[in-house]
Image (cartoon, rainbow, N blue to C red):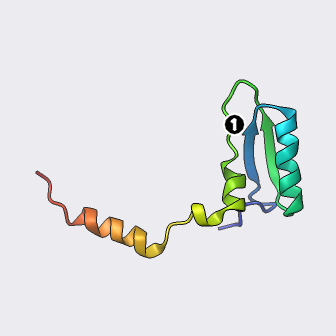
Amino acid sequence: MTRLGSHKRPAIVRVQTDERAQEIVDICHEHDWQLIVGVEPDKDEDVTDVMKLLHPERFTIRVEQAAGCRSRSAGRSAS
């Protein structure tokens, strides 16, 4: 999979003001990340992609944890 923030997979964010858009652009430029910014005053802000880039540890699930979740649910019987 292509890396988030690259030319092939830019971060996509939605903000409500031009000032907030500039803040996000500045952060991404500091880290050499590519992004697409939409300014939509009537919609909720969504900067999840940039947060994933800034704090990847908050958005990753360890393989062992994911496997444990599947095995627990697989062992349940339907009643």
The spot of residue 8 in percent (x, y) is 77, 60
Q: Residue furthest left?
A: 79
| Front position in the image: 16 or 7 | 16
- Point 87% across, 34% down: residue: 18
- Judge whether 19 appears above or below 26 on screen: above
How crowded is the residue under tag 1: few (<14 C-alpha within 10 Å), some, or many (20+)? some
SS under mark 1: loop
Q: Which residue is mark 1?
A: 45
Residue 16's image quarter?
top right
- Point 70% across, 46% down: residue: 47
The kind of residue tagged 1 is Glu
- Point 46% across, 74% down: residue: 63
The spot of residue 59 in percent (x, y) is 58, 61
Q: In which quadrant of the rendered image does the N terminus lie?
A: bottom right
In the displayed structure image, the side of residue 51 where residue 70 appears, left or right: left
- Point 55% across, 65% down: residue: 60
The spot of residue 54 in percent (x, y) is 72, 60
The spot of residue 79 in percent (x, y) is 10, 51
In the displayed structure image, the side of residue 67 where residue 16 appears, left or right: right
Q: Residue furthest bottom?
A: 64
| Front position in the image: 42 or 36 | 42
In the displayed structure image, the side of residue 1 where residue 21 appears, left or right: right
